[in-house]
Image (cartoon, grey):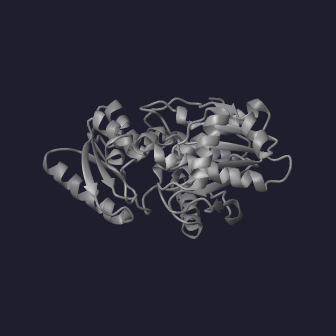
């Protein structure tokens, strides 16, 4: 890939990225599509979508980029088994299973009960069905808001596997670990800059879901390191703004520390909105339902109820408040299989 390097910072980041262990799992570059009907309806000068739902590997999504660095590290450590924890309908655990299998490794998945009052369909269809098809060994963790406890339980499972002669590799959930997954979106930023350069156009604002912080933090860090002028807006999908801002702040500094470069992100670069979060993670609201229908019926773009629909709902709010002549880009992070874990009534159909 011919990547524009316009500053010592950009060169340093690229050099550091290229030295990191990486397992190539996804299709890249992912395309950028125009969304002219939604742009007109929202009063935007332009609206595009970066199709990271098209990264390949078992229905694709943003986690493919993240897993290239986690599983690259696992391969470097000669691991034969991957362990990961996440919500019942987690896209991350589904893709970890797929990535592990593609590299000849076993996979153990711990499913956390993060979303209350769900049906049997939620626990059996969508990503859970794919986890089972991929042959994952499933474990359960009852508390969906105990990241450290979920990681400790993974450690206990890993200890048991070591006693069986296995070489496990844990993909951690809680903060405090090297943000290897975020590097996938520093790479994505590099990719985007090349696409902007070839098209001769950069949007005014880039909107995406903000959850663990690896995608949001990595993309923000990378775009700033490569000199992008666009505003990056994260839409809260799991925790409110007051909790998410320090998470993204820390994530960006952790990326800088991992790569051994200065942090290009300032406090004023971190834009986070939580006005479409309620009632909480993985739970529908009117704005989310409207975003799912609008995207599908205007542009045939299918969104999931947990991440991309909330992010699109946030974009719709942002667009309707934007100045005339504003152009936006939406990062579609995938997650489509989760749709099938939600009954039709959730969408008001």
Q: Quadrant of the N terminus?
A: top right
Q: Residue 126's x, y, as percent?
A: 39, 40
Horizontal arrangement in the rendering, residue 83 relative to residue 255 (left or right): left
Horizontal arrangement in the rendering, residue 143 relative to residue 340 (left or right): left
Q: Residue at x 67, y 60 (%)?
A: 271
Q: Residue 338's x, y, as percent?
A: 44, 43
Question: Which residue is at the far right?
Answer: 324
Q: Residue 145's x, y, as percent?
A: 39, 65
Location of residue 44 with respect to 27 vertically, above or below: below
Specify whether residue 299 is in view: yes
Q: Nearer the viewer, residue 248 or 293?
A: 293
User: What is the number of callouts on the image?
Assistant: 0
Question: Which residue is at the far bottom?
Answer: 242
Q: Residue at x 79, y 44 (%)?
A: 44
Horizontal arrangement in the rendering, residue 119 relative to residue 328 (left or right): left
Q: To which quarter of the image does residue 6 belong?
A: top right
Location of residue 28 with respect to 149 vertically, above or below: above
Horizontal arrangement in the rendering, residue 209 relative to residue 192 (left or right): left
Q: Residue at x 33, y 42 (%)?
A: 128
Location of residue 117 with respect to 169 vertically, above or below: below
Q: Residue 318's x, y, as percent?
A: 72, 54
Specify whether residue 103 is in view: no
Q: Residue at x 20, y 55 (%)?
A: 159
């Amino acid at each position: 890939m011919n990547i524009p390097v316009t500053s010592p910072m950009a060169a340093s980041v690229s050099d550091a990225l290229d030295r990191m262990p990486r397992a190539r799992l996804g299709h890249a570059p992912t395309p950028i599509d125009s969304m002219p009907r939604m742009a007109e309806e929202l009063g935007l000068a332009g609206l595009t979508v970066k199709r990271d739902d098209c990264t390949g590997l078992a229905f694709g999504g943003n986690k493919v980029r993240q897993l290239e660095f986690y599983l690259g590290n696992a391969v470097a450590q000669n691991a034969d088994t991957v362990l990961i924890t996440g919500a019942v309908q987690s896209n991350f655990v589904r893709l970890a299973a797929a990535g592990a299998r593609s590299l000849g490794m076993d996979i153990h998945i711990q499913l956390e009960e993060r979303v209350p009052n769900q049906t049997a369909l939620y626990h059996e269809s969508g990503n859970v069905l794919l986890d089972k098809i991929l042959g994952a060994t499933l474990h359960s963790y009852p508390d969906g808001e105990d990241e450290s406890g979920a990681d400790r339980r993974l450690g206990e499972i890993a200890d048991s596997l070591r006693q069986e002669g296995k070489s496990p590799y844990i993909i951690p959930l809680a903060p405090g670990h090297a943000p290897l997954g975020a590097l996938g979106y520093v790479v994505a930023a590099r990719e985007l800059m090349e696409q902007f350069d070839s098209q001769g156009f950069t949007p005014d604002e880039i909107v995406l879901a903000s959850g663990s912080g690896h995608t949001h933090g990595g993309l923000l860090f990378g775009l700033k390191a490569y000199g992008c002028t666009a505003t990056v807006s994260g839409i809260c999908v799991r925790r409110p703004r007051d909790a998410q801002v320090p998470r993204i702040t820390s994530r960006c500094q952790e990326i800088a520390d991992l790569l051994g470069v200065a942090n290009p992100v300032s406090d004023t670069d971190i834009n986070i909105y939580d006005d479409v979060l309620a009632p909480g993670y993985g739970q529908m609201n009117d704005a989310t339902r409207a975003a799912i229908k609008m995207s599908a019926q205007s542009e045939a773009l299918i969104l999931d109820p947990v991440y991309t629909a909330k992010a699109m709902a946030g974009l719709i709010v942002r667009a309707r408040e934007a100045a005339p002549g504003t152009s936006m880009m939406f990062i579609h992070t995938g997650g489509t299989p989760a749709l099938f874990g939600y009954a039709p009534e959730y969408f008001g159909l």
